[in-house]
Image (cartoon, rainbow, N blue to C red):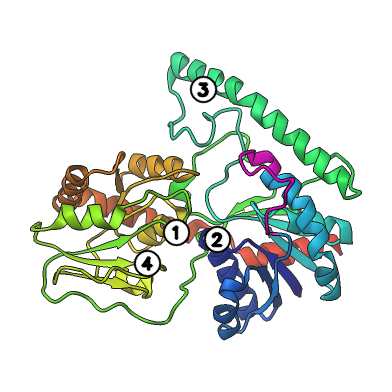
Amino acid sequence: MRVAVVAGPDPGHAFPALALCERFLAAGDEPVLFTGPRWFDAAKEAGIAVRRLKGLAPRAVDDDRDAGQRIHERAAHISTEILPDLSAMLPELVVSDVLTAGGGLAAERLGVPWVELSPHPLYLPSKALPPIGSGLAPGQGLRGRLRDGMLRTMSARAIRNGLRQREHARESVGLSATDPGPAARLVATLPALEVPRPDWPEHTHVIGPLLWEPTRKTLDLPPGDEPLVMVAPSTAHTGVAGMVDAVLAALDGAGVRVAISMLDTPPTDLPPWATAGLGRQDELLTHASLVVGGGGHGLLAKSLLAGVPIVTVPGGGDQWELANRAARQGSSILVRPLTVDAVRAAVRELLHTPSYTTAAQEAASGVADVADAIAICHDVLSVRA
């Protein structure tokens, strides 16, 4: 099967797309990844064919403060920009990241079936949940349901506006205003991070996290046998600034070692009980007693799959929602705002309370119940045929 996988270059979206491409390759399929050039070398090293995802650069008419315009109008533009390259590869299926909606629009324009990839829990609104992003658990009892209903009413205008923007974007590239949606949705998360809903969409499948390592290198560990704390600053532009300095200050004299895993240039003036750099996080997690990081889904899912509890320091975007879900599940302590005292207290709590590790291990066990992403994509084609 020739399949085009379309995802933006942000690590939280490019890495799951790369992981999915590796699964396609293992199944004997022929994936081509459309993304930013930052990951071309790593993709080629893994045997994945790549194409530049055109249309990413902001235009003079774009207003990135408007999320609906950023997603939908940019998607229409991207669909036009990638259409020639996409058409030339003759894909039988397109997989489009949920934030790179231009892949789905381009597939429709070519008459090719497409599948949506959500590299995190399902963020579609529900009639039974508080609005996504609030971080709230579903309300209990009459008062709780009334609260959720009021919050949904408050967010309904923004949802309607987004739908209108999507209709306009579709019509601007010659598609009908009515959106038929993808043939299937792949929700790449752990069941423990999903919230049950009575209106789970049809053809929507939890497939487990799609995790990918951007390097084969391993990070040297600090000497000693004290508990190891893995620190991973957020890769998102909405992440909390100053995390590394705050965590180092918090853990000075705490009787732990620290390994800082980061894509950016690491600090050089580290104490002897700390190390930093780019290394495989999956290997580092085999040594870690706990993690301190942003609330991004990639790190959170990777930590839970390893059965390692995490101190989440959420920034913007969906990090607040995810951090609260992990805290309710019992595998995490949420720290906000970021302070030295709060980080120190949270690390001590995780180190001395086994229930957090137990909850992380329970979350990891849920991966046994997820669906097979590649089989779902093959089924989409068989139904189409």
Q: Are dots 3 and 1 in contact, CB under 8 Å? A: no
Mark nearer the N terminus (4 vs 1)? 1
Which residue type carries mark 1? Thr
> Is 328 part of what is drawn in magenta?
no
In the displayed image of the protein, which residue is found farthest to the right? 174
Distance of label 4 from label 1 (alpha carbons): 8 Å
Give the position of the C terminus as an image quadrant. Answer: bottom right
Please give the label number shown on residue 148: 3
CA gap between label 4 and label 3 equals: 38 Å
Q: Earlier in the sequence, mark 2 or mark 4?
A: 2
Front of the two marks 3 and 1 = 1
Nearer-N-terminus badge (3/1): 3
Residue carrying label 2: 10
Of helix, strand and loop, which one carries label 1?
loop
Please tell me whether mark 4 or mark 3 is closer to you in this view.
Answer: 4
Residue bearing the label numbered 1: 235
Residue 121 is situated, as x and y percent measured from the top left of the image, at: 53, 48
